[in-house]
Amino acid sequence: MRWGTLLVAGAFALGACASTGESTTGRTVGTTIGALAGGVIGYQKNKKTGAVVGAVVGGAAGYAIGWLVDEYVMKKTKSAAQVRAEYKVPEKKAVPPAVHGYGVVIDPDKTLARGKGAEATTGFDLVAASGAKPSVEESRTIVAPDGNRIHTKRYSYKEVDGAGGYEFRHKLPVPAEADQGIYRYDSVLYVNGKEASRASNDFQVARASGGGTAVAGLGPRRSERRIR
């Protein structure tokens, strides 16, 4: 398999867990950073569960959109009871919220046409006292090959309803004029306004045969849990 013809991401598992639901949210807003080749950006709907989400950014000519979009899909991967059992949390004891297993996956599975992109998923387990509903926010940043930050967006995940396992899938549009090279995808998770954990992943943008833009995930660089 030759690089530039077919690039496959080496995604890492966020944990074997039971799916307990998936929802979609977000505003249909784009930032005019890169030109996208048009059409509809959306998530493929799972045959069993899932939700289709995405901004209509197309038409024949296409519109401009940034690297990070507002839309996302939330999936609850573990129940509160599963998390309490896994991390041995006493059911009636008041415990401070804590984040475990935070990570980010970049997942293209084929050569991508010019101006399209990939998908970025972050996942984590949230430990919290019974009945507590901590506020959860996440900052996502794209860092260019030269080290400059080119796009940052912060999300408020109001769907988090307490302890449990969560995944958040975001589209990652790659502007048609994006430079070749290795980019970094940084994400920081905040719980009740304080930094709880951070993760990072690399992905490569290259010109594929036929003039397309190929994107491949290169694996996680780091994942850190913050002591609060």
Image (tube, helix red, strand yellow):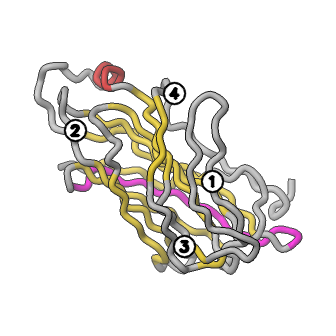
Q: CA distance from mark 3 to mark 4?
A: 32 Å
Task: Residue 48: give x, y in percent of width and height.
Answer: 62, 28
Q: Which mark is residue 66?
A: 3
Q: Residue 11's x, y, as percent?
A: 61, 45
Q: Is residue 6 left or right of residue 124?
A: right
Instruction: Identify the amino acid type marked 3.
Output: Gly
- Type of amino acid under label 4: Ala
Left/right placement of residue 213 relative to residue 42 reads right
Instruction: Find numbered disc 4 in the image and state the secondary structure of the residue it sits on.
Output: loop
Magenta-span inclusion, residue 29? no
**In the rendered structure, are the residues bearing label 2 and label 1 in contact, judged by CB atoms less than 8 Å apart?**
no
Q: Residues within 10 Å of mark 4 (few under 14, many from 20)?
A: few
Q: Which segment is the magenta one?
A: 194-210
Q: Which x, y percent locates residue 216? A: 68, 58
Q: Mark 3, residues whose alpha carbon is within 10 Å: few (<14), some, or many (≥20)?
A: many
Q: Nearer the viewer, residue 127 or 24?
A: 24
**If you read the primary sequence from the N terminus, does the residue marked by circle 1 or circle 3 appear first?**
1
Badge 2 or badge 1: first in the primary sequence = 1
- Which amino acid, by three-letter code, is at mark 2? Lys
Q: Which residue corresponds to mark 4?
A: 16
Q: Earlier in the sequence, mark 4 or mark 1?
A: 4
- For the residue carrying disc 1, how many other residues have a C-alpha within 10 Å: few (<14), some (14-19), or many (20+)? some
Front residue of 12/37: it is 37
Q: Secondary structure at mark 2?
A: loop
